[in-house]
Image (cartoon, helix red, strand yellow):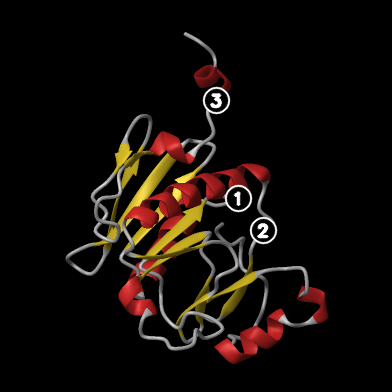
Amino acid sequence: MTAAPHTPTTVRLTNEAFWAFCERPENADKQFELIEGIPSEMPQPKWLHQEVVRLVVRLLIRFLDHHPLGACYTDNTAYILAPEVILVPDISFIRTERLAAFVNLPDYPPFAPDLAVEVASPSNTPVDLTEKAALYLKHGTSSVWVIYPEKRAVRFYRPAADGGVYFYDLVGDAVLENDPVLPGFRTPITAFFSPTKTEESPS
């Protein structure tokens, strides 16, 4: 779930100040990310959003049961990517070797996830989502999937050789595969979405 437009503020917050901001009584029922020092409130997820998260997590966990490459996490896992950058992907994946570095897990992962998955909200623009994907990649994420439930499409982001970002779109019966973060993972993107009434009906 990508963040809504930035909450108005005139002061850039440090990570410590951000946690204090989140603990204010008026923010008790809200969730925020910190984007370059600016707290950004995340919208409440709709049912369609949660259904996509459920389906994708189920696919990833099934894959990881047979290919123990790491761990998959869902909503509310905040990642401290850098000073003034704390993001909360809808779904994330961390490789086993990175997890093995911790005897005891800290409150929040102090790095970017290897894979970040964001489910687009109706209020998000492609520019917003590309900027957020670029922020993940800048701080060490290897792949970002942005899923568009209404369009039944996926945009796949990777770092470009020149230091920028490249992406390509998967629509219709396209297959998501060859992600170096999850070698061997392969699925038609239709598996990310509940069947439509047309798909459920006999031909």
Q: Position of residue 14 (x, y in %)?
A: 56, 89
Q: Secondary structure at mark 1?
A: loop
The residue at the point 40 percent across, 70 percent down is 113
Mark 3 and mark 1 in contact (Cβ < 8 Å)? no
Q: Secondary structure at mark 2?
A: loop
Residue assigned mark 2: 43
Please identify, in this view, whether the residue under mark 1 or under mark 2 is nearer the observer: 2
Q: Position of residue 164 (x, y in %)?
A: 26, 65
The residue at the point 67 percent across, 69 percent down is 31
Q: Position of residue 48 (x, y in %)?
A: 62, 42
Residue at the right extreme, as displayed: 25
Q: Is residue 6 left or right of residue 139?
A: right
Mark 2 and mark 1 in contact (Cβ < 8 Å)? yes
Identify the mark nearer the N-term, 2 or 3.
Answer: 2
Residue 122 visible in the snapshot? no
Residue assigned mark 3: 196
Q: Secondary structure at mark 3?
A: loop
Query: Which of 36/153 is in front?
Result: 153
Q: Amino acid at mark 1?
A: Ser
Residue assigned mark 1: 123
The residue at the point 36 percent across, 85 percent down is 101
Measured in 3D between alpha carbons, the distance from the residue under mark 1 to the one under mark 3, in whole angstroms, is 23 Å
For disc 2, the neighbor class at 10 Å (few under 14, some 14 to 19, many from 20) is some
Residue 123 visible in the snapshot? yes
In the rendered image of this protein, does residue 172 appear above or below residue 130? above
